Amino acid sequence: MKNAFALALICYAAFCGSAAGPVSASASSPHPARSDSAFPAHALLAKKGTSPGRTTATVTVNNVRYHAHKKYTRVVFDLTGRVQIKERKNQRIATISLPNVTLSKRVQQQIRRKDFPRAMTLSPEKPRTVNIVLDLQTLRTYRIFTLGQPDRVAMDLFYAKKTPAIAAKPETGKRKPAKPARPGQSRVTRSNSPSAKTSKGLLVVIDPGHGGRDPGTTGRKGTKEKTIVLQVSKYLRELIQDRHKAKVLLTRSKDKFLDLEKRVKFANKKKLEWCGKDTGSNVDANKKSRICLFISIHVNSHPRRSIQGLEIYHFGKASDPRALEVAARENGMKLESDTPPWQFIITDSLNDHKIKESQTFAESTNDKLVTTLRKNYKIRNHGVKTAPFYVLRFTTMPSILAEVGFVSNSMEEKRLKTTTFQKKLAEGIYQGIQAYLKVL
């Protein structure tokens, strides 16, 4: 399986390795990179060298994607350029205008689908303006934000709670007095505990990259990737076990070589034992409500020693040539082949649900990791990216890979060696897990 995947990746590199910029997502592909280029909805996102009075090229909405999470529905509009957002609302509706924007024929078909999010309508308006109209009678609230690299507008729709089928009975009698708490017993209910819902139903498989005879990348001062990622993984395991009381497993707990197939096989076996199969009526009812996650931790490297920062990956076509290089290095292969590009075939498609959940998991982790580290360090955020990593392709649960720093950069190599920074990395990833669980 590993050799077949390696051949596929080589062929894909031959097909698109010459691409100069990031690859936009299609309707079936995962979400593109999310980076520091995110701005508030009211911000003017103009290209450098332009001014409000200058005429710019018309931007096209070439795709729309949407997914219903437990607490909200996210709608993402893929654009061919940056846009200016204008917002107005009254008690009944909110209108978000995108001036100098048109809808592609594909999007015009997508918004007419029966499963398109209710409470939202799109109406093209002349001259070259698209209005997104929201029904505030149906929504409790909403939020808008813009993303770059590539350009997108995203909206989260929070629907009002449904009226219960049976109205609650009025309180006519006296309430029964609450039982006194026992000495040392807290009156806080289970529902107030942030981890009560998932603490006993969560499995996290942490994969420290490389190990043994495979040191991974090495810094100028001799710092080995395998050593750093193992320590960060152990700190993360301690945090999850102590605070969340969840089940946490490491693919390796010592300096031991473990090939990619064994890592994937280990994770999938534990997932099957803990969460059961994704579908089917024979799954244990208790396992259906459980959550299984996979996190692979690595350290990055770059020929230019000035490059620093972190980036989070989930599986997909490489979002840029650099992402493909990183995947090739972590997959243990070279990007050299004369194999015809038409032979690049992924034989069995990924489950759409896994792709979307991995994307959300990656975004939550990236946000919290950056926020946590920036309290004490100056951090460059390269955002969320996609690439064909072997361990992300073949694991059967929501999966991400974190490149937590560049050991090729002298300043980051120094940081990565310290216990303080390693614990901060673990803290940020832990907070990302918590944030992801809240949106399920």
Image (spheres, rainbow, N blue to C red):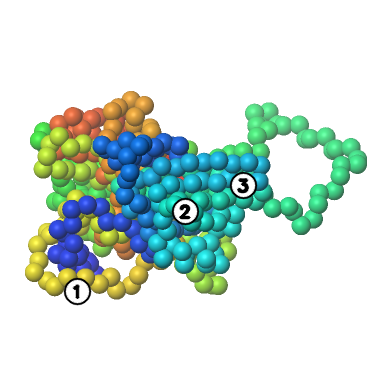
| Picture quadrant of residue 103 | bottom left
Could you say whether the residue bearing mark 3 is in a helix, strand or loop?
Answer: strand
Residue 330 appears in the rendering: no
Q: Are dots 3 and 2 in contact, CB under 8 Å?
A: no
Label 3 or label 1, whichever comes before in sequence order:
3
- Residue 93's disc number: 3
Label 2 or label 1, whichever comes before in sequence order:
2
Residue that sits furthest to the top in the current view: 376
Rendered position, 198 above or below 180: below
Few, some or many residues within 10 Å of mark 2 (<14, 14–19, 20+): few
User: The N terminus lies in which quarter of the figure?
Assistant: bottom left
Few, some or many residues within 10 Å of mark 1 (<14, 14–19, 20+): few
Q: Which amino acid type is shown beneath numbered disc 2?
A: Lys
Could you say whether the residue bearing mark 2 is in a helix, strand or loop?
Answer: loop
Image position, residue 139 (x, y; %): 62, 48
Could you say whether the residue bearing mark 1 is in a helix, strand or loop?
Answer: helix
Residue with the mark numbered 2: 126
Which residue is at 16% across, 59% downward?
A: 17
Q: Are dots 3 and 1 in contact, CB under 8 Å?
A: no
Q: Which amino acid type is shown beneath numbered disc 1?
A: Gln
Image position, residue 209 (x, y; %): 24, 49
Q: Is residue 394 left or right of residue 340?
A: right
Q: CA distance from mark 3 to mark 2?
A: 20 Å
Label 3 or label 2, whichever comes before in sequence order:
3
Q: Which amino acid type is shown beneath numbered disc 3?
A: Ile
Residue with the mark numbered 1: 343
Observer-nearest of 206 and 220: 220
Q: Are dots 2 and 1 in contact, CB under 8 Å?
A: no
Q: Is residue 373 left or right of residue 304?
A: right
Q: Nearer the observer, disc 3 or disc 2?
A: 2
Residue 166 appears in the rendering: yes
How many numbered discs sit on the rendered protein? 3
